[in-house]
Amino acid sequence: MLADVSWLSPVELVGYLASALVVASLAMTNVVRLRTISLIGSVIFVVYGALLGSIPIILTNAAVAGLNVWFLRKELGGGRTLGAVPIDAEAPFLQDFLRTHLPDIHKSQPGFETVPADAYALLLTRDGLPAGALLGERRGSELRLTLDYVMEAYRDSRIGRWLYTGDGQKVLRDAGFRTVVATPATAVHRSYLQGVGFVPDGDALARILD
């Protein structure tokens, strides 16, 4: 049975909604989602402040909304420095990184367990910090992906699009690759790959580098 909220005024309901959104944003691990929900909450708080006639509430939350817009534009508008750094497949740092994030990796790529010693490996970075990893098997000019992972916090930072359709392709081309092939095991991974330019190629998906 739904709770009776008839004792709440419309103004109070607006305030509670704004509060709930701000609290929910703090639980987000994805940076873009956090900023988006926080932005919506702060805008509703501005409305709440206007309904109360409270200048401090309006000014504070207008400032919060402005900061969220600024960070979202930086996050999505190309203001981030993205990178892909070749790394030895057996490098301790890479091994530790993958082991730490293995539960998250298995949500989209459940078959991944270990890194073959001869794998081609890239450490994906954002603003100089580790953000993910790409691993694959070299077959001439073709790279057969065994892992394509980006941390949840950075999945809306366009790293995949940068790597497969943008300037990041140069890293793969310089390594001698002309085609990247993947065999996704989950719908979410397949959707992601198709979103960054992969097309059906038999039972697999392939991306021919520009």
Image (cartoon, helix red, strand yellow):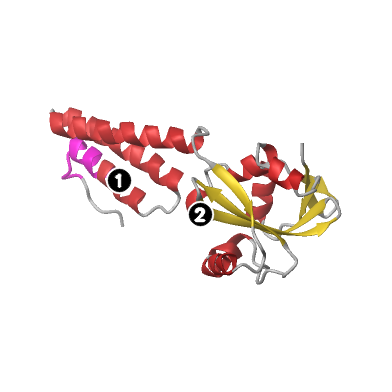
Q: Amino acid at mark 2?
A: Glu
How far from the left and from the top, in percent, is residue 27? Answer: 36, 55
In terms of sequence position, does the residue under pointer 1 or pointer 2 come before the other?
1
**Residue 79 falls left or right of residue 45:** right
Question: For residue 22, which numbered disc appears in the image?
Answer: 1
Q: Amino acid at mark 1?
A: Val
Q: Local crowd at mark 2 within 10 Å, few (<14), some, or many (≥20)?
A: some
Residue extent of the magenta highlight: 6-17
How far from the left and from the top, in percent, is residue 145? Answer: 73, 57
Viewer can see residue 149: no
Task: Kindly identify the residue that appears in the image at 31 percent across and 39 percent down.
Answer: 41
Disc 2 designates what residue?
A: 152
Residue 50 versus residue 118 in the image, above or below: above
If the image is split into quadrants, where does the N terminus sit?
A: bottom left
Task: Kindly identify the residue that appears in the image at 69 percent across and 38 percent down.
Answer: 165
**Residue 37 falls left or right of residue 44:** right
